[in-house]
Amino acid sequence: MPRRSTAYRTTHFTSQRRGWALPLAAALLIACKQPPPVVSEEAHFDFATDLPDEVCGGNLVGMGDLIDKVEELFNVESPHFVFYWLPGDQFSEHSACVSKGPACFRPEEGAIYSSFLPAGHEIIHAVFARWEIHPALNEGLANLFEEPTPSTHEPDPSVAIEDVLAYSGKDVDYPVDYRGRGAHFVRFLIDQYGFDRVARLVRVSLREVDLMANSGFFEDSLGEPLSEVLSAYKNAPLCPLVEARFASVECQSPPIRTRLGEDSWSEDIELNCSDADTYGSSEGAQWTPRTLDIETAGTFEFSLQAIPPEFAEVVLGRCGGGCGQGLYLRIAGGDSMTAELHPGQYYLLFARHEGAPVAFQLAVERSDG
Ligand SMILES: [Zn+2]
């Protein structure tokens, strides 16, 4: 906000008005209260918060890893940005977000304002900020690379992809019910045409441009006319976005421990926010990821003990994800579960949703051999 001149202040703060001058000054101070200071200068962003001791230990490195991965996959260069972490009431006080919701990226400022961590969704918007891409692709990429909280934007079978691609309004007005469908379409494009060709499409697909009326973008980038792309897309299986997402950060985490004998694992974890591999908090949830490599397909039993068991769970997902091959299963503390697994790499999130630190004990055994 602009500074008021000294002349303005001396004219108005006369003695007879001193009764309200002090409260007014206090109100101005609050209105002008600066966002929190930068506490960490990372390779891709400056991290700003008033509560540096409450940032779980894995967030900043994980956020950097996400940016590195997306830069590499799409051959895009992230601009340097500022990340303001504003938990609780701080968000309504300091956020410059125009849209509703608990986080946003403001391209005009080069800043993310978020009430939670790690906010991978907004980070993806920041990474692609220079490309000014169509909201269907921009939001789709953000949904596919954000952290593994179950997405509220599931692909809606009643939404036609043609309508999503024809959207030519502003980013902030992009319809909520288009989001899941758009993300599902982006996942299909990546599976079908690969990252390089999709990166070319993303780069030319300007925002506020009707993509249905610019089908040349598709043919030039993907090497196939839009009509053929869309007819192939009609046969793509639908799935929840938690299965379709790429889980790139979790899948770089260390494997759980192998026990004596084949196809048997166990892991003991005490989850503490301050540990270097703990992420969050996001709506009270904190988590730490591990990986599991399955060499031969089969049925596996997962048993989870957790102290305390309330609000504790382990999420099992497939690295790389994808509709038809993805997976997203949740095992509550004190429960066990069997899962049919194909060969490949999986991730496990040891998560608590509320309360004190949790001690986890997970056992995994092949149960069909
Ligand atoms: Zn978004």
Image (cartoon, rainbow, N blue to C red):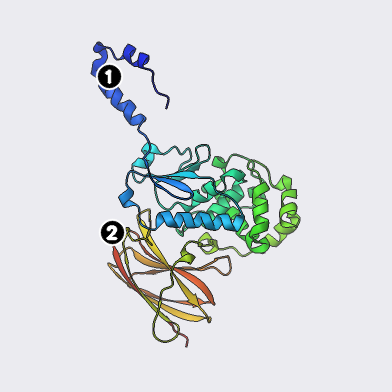
Classify mark 2: helix, strand or loop.
Answer: loop
Labelled pair 2, 1 in contact (Cβ < 8 Å): no
- Front-most of residues 252 and 119: 252
Residue kind at label 2, given as amino acid type: Gly
Q: Which residue is mark 1?
A: 21
Question: Can you give x and y, in whole percent of width and height, for residue 166 in the image?
Answer: 67, 46
Which quarter of the figure is the N terminus placed in? top left
Query: Can see residue 353?
Result: yes
In-image side of 63 versus 313 (left or right): right
Q: Position of residue 360 (x, y in %)?
A: 32, 70
Closer to us: mark 2 or mark 1?
1
Question: What x and y, as percent, mark residue 108?
Answer: 52, 37
Mark 2 and mark 1 lie on one chain; the one further toward the N terminus is 1
Question: Would residue 273 appear left or right of 199 to someone viewing this image?
Answer: left
Q: Nearer the viewer, residue 260 or 226?
A: 260
The disc label shown at residue 195, or none: none
- At a point 38% along the width and 20% down the height, the residue shown is 4
Give the side of residue 274 with respect to residue 193, left or right.
Answer: left
Badge 2 local density, few (<14 within 10 Å), some, or many (20+)? few
Q: Secondary structure at mark 1?
A: helix
